[in-house]
Amino acid sequence: MLKIGIHFRGQSIHALMIIRNTRIKDLWIVDGEPFFDPRGEFCRLFCCGELSDILSSRNIEQINLSSSKTKGTIRGMHFQHSPYAEMKMVRCLTGRVLDVVIDLRRGSDTFLEWHAEELSGDDHRMLVIPEGFAHGFQTLEDNCDVLYLHTAKYHPESAGRVNFKDPRVGIDWPLDVSEISAPDRDHPFLVQAFEGLEV
């Protein structure tokens, strides 16, 4: 775990970003610690310098916002093939979601394993997802807004999917599905010969 402290308007305050690894290599959790004063709170959402070890030479190329109205909605599981593979940084701004990733990296010790983190508008938590992972989430409440920072622009011709209920992965979704796009719902399951993505 790495704590990063900052100075705010000349005041030395407690750490605003706590970076933790997960059991899956290169998958990170960043917890923000807000600074409170009589006006309210201040929390850092992103900082190139403080996340430099994770970002390495990557740059944020695109920022997107998804809004989902109904509890039980699933979006995913999505990724981009090389050469447009991307790191994603995902944060829930409003509501509560179960954010899920699948390790698709060829040769990884955790190949086809999944990891889930509950993210909410109250917890100031961000999941940092490296290239070679599929990503998606299920809303646990109505009216959820999820913010994505991407290190590559969206290229439709490079878009890939894993079916959210693929039996080779076996994600344990907590709720019945209320809404899902037809492409996500109907995407074929992984073939047995699938050996992963080169990253």
Image (cartoon, rainbow, N blue to C red):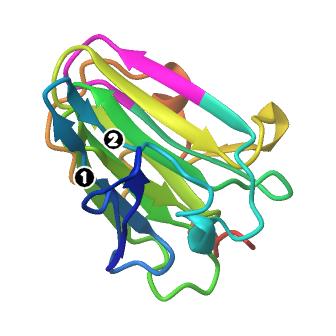
Q: Nearer the viewer, residue 149 or 10?
A: 10
Q: Quick check: 21 above or below 99? A: below
The stretch in magenta equals 64-74
Q: Quick check: 156 above or below 113? A: above
Q: Quick check: 94 above or below 124? A: above
Which of the two labelled residues, at mark 2 and mark 1, occupies the earlier sequence position? 1
Q: On the picture, is 195 further left or further right than 103?
A: right
| Residue assigned mark 2 | 43
| Residue assigned mark 1 | 33
Residue type (three-letter) at the residue carrying disc 1 = Glu
Q: Determine the residue located farthest toward the top in the rendered image.
A: 69
Asked if residue 171 is among those painted magenta in the image, a careful observer would answer: no
Residue type (three-letter) at the residue carrying disc 2 = Cys
Q: Residues within 10 Å of mark 1 (few under 14, many from 20)?
A: some
Q: Nearer the viewer, residue 42 or 158?
A: 42
Asked if residue 72 is among those painted magenta in the image, a careful observer would answer: yes
